[in-house]
Amino acid sequence: MPVAVELELSESLDDFIRNEIEEFGLRDEQEYFERLARAEQKKKIQAYYERKLKEAIEQDAWIEATPEFYEKLLEGIKERHRSKQREKLA
């Protein structure tokens, strides 16, 4: 469900945002802030996985990614999905 947010911005910041909207061909302020939030979310997710990869490298905690590994991984994902579907139906 969408949530409405009201912001009070300085005139210079408002001008900046309006220029950004025009420059990138966005519909309105909502689209600008949605893109801004998604970009920040993507950065945080990427930083998380980079940290995890660095930890694995430092701990020498490698798992060989063979075709069998991917088959097992995919089967686990499918089973979790099936379990969630069964829970919804129960």
Image (spheres, helix red, strand yellow):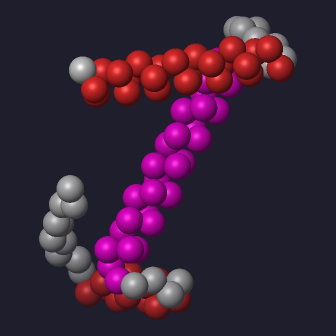
Up the image or down, 65 lies above or below 23; here it is: above
Q: Residue at (58%, 17%) from the top-left corner?
A: 76
| Residue 46 is inside the magenta segment | yes
Residue 56 percent across, percent down from the top left: 69, 16
Up the image or down, 76 lies above or below 1; here it is: above
Q: Is residue 4 rendered to the left or right of residue 61? A: left
Q: Is residue 20 rendered to the left or right of residue 17? A: right
Region in magenta: 28-55
Residue 10 percent across, percent down from the top left: 24, 80
Nearest the eye: 49 or 67: 67
Q: Quadrant of residue 85?
A: top left
Q: Quadrant of residue 53?
A: top right
Nearest the eye: 88 or 36: 88
Q: Residue at (84%, 17%) from the top-left corner?
A: 66
Up the image or down, 14 lies above or below 65; here it is: below
Residue 69 can be seen in this image: yes
Q: Quadrant of the N terminus?
A: bottom left
